Amino acid sequence: MANILDVSTGDNLQYQFFPVSSGSVQFKIRAPNDAHIALTMGPQESDPMCEVYIGGWGNTKSVIRRNRTKPEKAEIETPNILNAGEFRGFWVRWDGGIISAGLEGEAIPFISWADPEPFPIAFVGVCTGWGASGTWKIEDGAEFNTPDKLEYKFGPVASGSLELEYRGPHNCHVCLTPAAAEVDPMYEIILGGWENTQSVIRHCRQKPDKVTVPTPGIMNPNEFKKFLMEWRCGRLMVRDGRTGALLMEWLDPSPFPITHFGVRTGYGAQGNWRIKHFSRGGAQSLPPPPSAPSAAALYSAPPGYPGYPGAAPVSGGAGLWVDATSGQVPPGAVVGGQDCSGEPIYVARAQHEGALIPGKLASSHGCAYVAWGGQEHGKNEYQVLIGGPNNWVPTSGSNIPPGAFPGGQSEDGEPLFVGRVRHEGSLTTGKVQQSHGVCYISFGGQELGFPDYEILIA
């Protein structure tokens, strides 16, 4: 069975993203007009980005657009290509910078364009708009059937979680890796091994296993069994996907960044898989466990605070913000902390929703992150602080010390300062918003607020 997502999109031009593990995606769409497909590096609208509009302009034409700007890169008349009463099948492919779209069953595209500045595409977004709601059946180009062969099939992960369903007699193998290959370091989770009698967690393909638990009869060749895998700063958890019960857990003292998963079967077993990746509006997961102490509510001023007009005087100006992309770290970048893996975290900032937001840069992730609206947002284009101060002062709430270093401003024009907090083995930089009385950091896909923090002083 292929990796299929059923998605509904409203008349709101708001993309729902999911990761892809190959250079193509197939889908069926039932909509009266305006099926929009976005190809991006991350699970959000950010440049660089290519969009394919199918059945736009009242279901009369289709176009390819780059970075949400006109003129169109390609345009063709496609009258009545979509239908509100039936599913129509399409494919979109990208190879060597050539973006193309075609009808199901036809090898020749009806529209294509060669991007002179191609970029790695890891996510696809879908939406409808302009009077259209749509129902989608989306199939990743990669198959997730596994034969009786100890060979992993890989796909990218969108966050610190993965949900899967497996139907097979035994030996459901899942690996978590920093690349789309069997490389060290790696975690392996074997469910229903040893003739469906026990399950283990293995590190770097080495014995003894880190965790071994008896799980007799956990797999069934005639029934899909659901599992949820979560990882956060080296804490690896395997849960029953239906009840949420914790099956196995292990804390890695030397964690590493996980970017891919792999699945396989072996030892006399063939398996069928349904793989769901987490993204807003897509597959739903179990609620994540609390990952932060109680903090001030998002976007509510602390008791007794009169508002940010007339806030503490700001001084500073030392240092320079330098443009960078794709995980680049300019010489002289200010180290503000470190990830739970030990990797340095640099002071960075990026534009988002009309705000200029201080955040964090971990180079191996290939992007910077900022916190906004309760979520973590990856940014391929960002600025890094170089040659600036590195004096951090503890404070709390709305108490902004004199000389606090300004790092940006909110969409309402409120100054945002650079702060940091210790959380789950990391020292993570983020934004201090005085009117909210907290320092916000992006962590594990979320925006987390902390009333006690350190602030950068110029």
Image (spheres, rainbow, N blue to C red):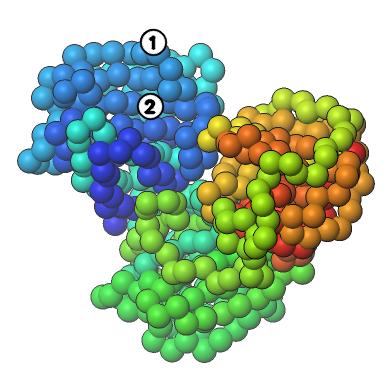
Label 1 crowd bin: few (<14), some (14–19), many (20+), radius 10 Å:
few
Identity of the residue furthest to the top in this view:
71
Residue 355 horizontal side relative to residue 37, left or right: right
Asked if residue 46 is positioned above or below residue 184 in the image, the reply reads above
Residue underneath mark 1: 71
**Res 5 label:** none
Q: How many marks?
A: 2
Q: CA distance from mark 1 to mark 2?
A: 13 Å
Q: Which residue is drawn at the image coordinates 51% and 32% (left, top)?
A: 46
Q: Position of residue 163 (x, y in %)?
A: 43, 64
**Residue 34 at least partly seen:** yes
Q: Nearer the viewer, residue 171 or 423?
A: 423
Q: Position of residue 22 (x, y in %)?
A: 43, 40
Q: Does residue 20 appear anywhere in the picture? A: no
- Residue 50's place in the image compared with 143, above or below, is above
Residue type, label 1: Pro
Measured as percent of width and height from the top left, residue 360 is found at 71, 44
Q: Nearer the viewer, residue 280 or 130?
A: 130
Label 1 or label 2, whichever lies nearer to me, is 1
Q: Residue 76's x, y, as percent?
A: 23, 13
Q: Closer to the N terminus: mark 1 or mark 2?
A: 2
Q: Left or right of 308: which side holds 72? A: left
User: Quadrant location of residue 52?
Assistant: top left
Q: Nearer the viewer, residue 439 or 180?
A: 439
* Residue at screen point 47% across, 82% down: 245
Q: Nearer the viewer, residue 218 or 76?
A: 76
Q: Amino acid at mark 2?
A: Glu
SS of the residue at dot 1?
strand
Point 92% across, 46% down: residue: 391
Per the image, the residue denoted by label 2 is: 51
